[in-house]
């Protein structure tokens, strides 16, 4: 079945024109989505300084008898089991502290549930960018 119209010439190359229009439309959409778009989903740059214990050349106090318990304290002692180096101390959570943390997490989840997929994707991209940028500094030196 041939298309004919009294308004258009019969020798007009319909297929070529259709392909050209489709290419222009898809080209515009690709350009808009990559270059001209508002980059509101781009990851946010931020930096968290490495703890002293992760920096090259750090040497912590070597524990003679490594243990997580500290005499006369409720703090938990953190140490490198391979070397006995003291990394730091943390205070254990109390039942009330745990309850407060759970309540804060539940409140944060209510706010997170209100975000759009686009906003969540931005958060995840930000986290991915940070991990990718920081991975080399997190690995131990040989």
Image (spheres, grey):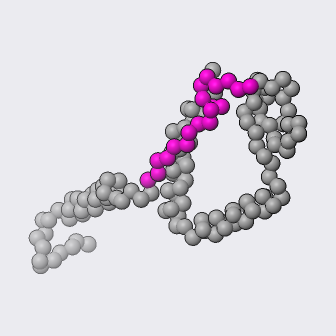
Rendered location of residue 124, percent (x, y): 55, 53
Task: Decide whether residue 141 is among the magenta residues.
Answer: no
Q: Which residues are magenta?
A: 42-61
Q: Residue at x 51, y 51 (%)?
A: 125
- If the image is split into quadrants, where does the C terminus sit? top right
- The single residue placed furthest to the bottom in the displayed view is 6
Query: Would you say the magenta stretch is mainly helix, strand or loop?
Result: loop
- If the image is split into quadrants, where does the N terminus sit? bottom left
Rendered location of residue 9, percent (x, y): 11, 70
Task: Name which quarter of the figure residue 2 lies in.
Answer: bottom left
Q: Would you say 42 lies left or right of 94 here?
A: left
Task: Decide whether residue 58 is among the magenta residues.
Answer: yes
Q: Would you say 12 lies left or right of 2 here?
A: left
- Residue 65 in the image: above or below residue 120: above
Quick check: can you spot residue 133? yes
- The single residue placed furthest to the right in the displayed view is 71
Quick check: can you spot residue 22? no
Q: Residue at x 49, y 47 (%)?
A: 46
- The single residue placed furthest to the front in the displayed view is 72
Q: Residue at x 68, y 24 (%)?
A: 59
- Residue 19 in the image: above or below residue 68: below
């Amino acid at each position: 079945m041939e298309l004919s119209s009294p308004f258009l010439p019969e020798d007009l190359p319909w297929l070529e024109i259709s392909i050209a229009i489709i290419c222009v439309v898809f080209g515009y959409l690709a350009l808009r989505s990559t270059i001209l778009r508002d980059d509101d989903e781009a990851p946010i740059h931020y930096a968290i300084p490495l703890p002293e214990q992760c920096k090259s050349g750090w040497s912590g106090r070597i524990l003679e008898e490594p243990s997580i318990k500290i005499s006369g304290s409720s703090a938990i002692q953190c140490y490198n089991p391979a070397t006995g180096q003291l990394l730091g101390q943390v205070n254990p959570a109390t039942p009330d502290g745990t309850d407060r943390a759970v309540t804060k997490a539940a409140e944060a989840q209510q706010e997170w549930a209100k975000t759009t997929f686009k906003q969540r994707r931005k958060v995840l991209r930000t986290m991915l960018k940070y991990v990718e940028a920081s991975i080399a500094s997190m690995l131990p030196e040989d």
